[in-house]
Image (cartoon, helix red, strand yellow):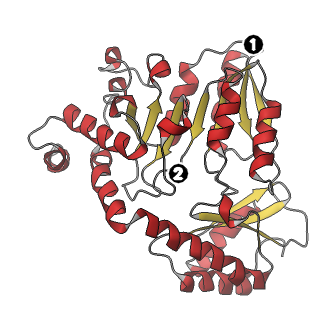
Amino acid sequence: MEEQPDRFFLDRIVPGADKATALRAVADALGEFVGVSGNNVALLENATSGTQAVLNSVSFEPGDQILITNHQYNAVRLAVETRCRETGATPLVVQIPMRASYGEIRACIRDAANRKVKLAIVDHITSPTALVFPIRDIIADLHELAIPVLVDGAHALGQIPLDLADIEPEWYVSNAHKWLYSPKGSAFLYAAPQVAGMTRPTTVSHFVELGFPRAFDYVGTRDCTGWLAIPAAITFLEELGFAEFRDHNQALLERAAGILADVGAEPIAPLEMCGAMRSFALPQSRELQPDDGIALRDALWHEERVQVAGHAFGASLLVRISAQAYVDEEDLSRLKSALERRGWPGR
């Protein structure tokens, strides 16, 4: 009985194939979608585990630095801090203003980079602030100092077009379960040919001697049915119309600025710096508390059944809207009404 779900999906990827063959077929489809060979794509449960694998694959010594930014996803920041404690390296946290232009974002990272940095981890689309970073230019700047780059693209796959061969990162991680409509537990790690040989999974198991990416295919008991659904998810998004999908989402984010202006919410970035997400700063009558973002998120969901992300970033309380194919202007109006009724921490 345990193998029936796998067998059901396996036969739809490569009829009669074993699991290993089917997983490589999934990697090929995913690689084609993001502009690289499937031979450089490993399948994972989430982007965080891919980040951890890269951190464990790079050798650090006391005096080395790992570059991140203050917009970094919290789990990634914690993973970097843990790796630094293990090795004697130190985090180099680049401070980027919440309201920064593309040029300012690039300059902040370029000016902070130095020869001590052994790895840079940079968001493609930031989580709390929902900014699309000028990742191609950032990578080019870091490569001038021979700094390898891991791009945290957790929100990028399916939200914006991806061409990894064009932006040329050493590593790229992303989730398929956020914007590509795949089941939870679907993600990938790309490793460029020059670093694939050194990239190893966090769990050593039966396929480890096969090297990247096959070493990631079998790392103990895991449910891979979510991965097997990725080709169907890609087909669905393509049939939906990627360009039309993006136009729909951008129009919603533009309309959101007008609707939420009535409650004093201000977008922190122009629309051209957003993908399908946009963060808005809410006015505060008191100093921001660290848990205000969580309190905002939980109150809107539990009391109003409105699902948005809330973040405490710097001195600002942010509400982040995710536009989607199933979201419309009525949903934005419900959010506005909920904020009017319930308010928010520190209103």
Q: Position of residue 227 (x, y in %)?
A: 32, 45
Give the residue at mark 1: 62
Label 1 Cα crowd, 10 Å radius (few <14 / some 14-19 / many 20+): few
Q: Which residue is mark 2?
A: 156
Secondary structure, mark 1, is: loop
In which quarter of the view is residue 344 placed? bottom right
Q: Amino acid at mark 1?
A: Pro
Identified by mark 2, the residue type is Ala
Q: Tag 2's secondary structure?
A: loop
Q: CA distance from mark 1 to mark 2?
A: 33 Å
How far across and down, in percent of the image, does residue 16 sit? Answer: 8, 40
Q: Position of residue 70 (x, y in %)?
A: 76, 44
Instruction: Place residue 269 in its image quadrant.
Output: bottom right
Percent position of residue 118, x then y: 68, 20
Residue 117's disc number: none
Horizontal side of 335 relative to 239 (left or right) equals: right
Q: Nearer the viewer, mark 1 or mark 2?
A: 2
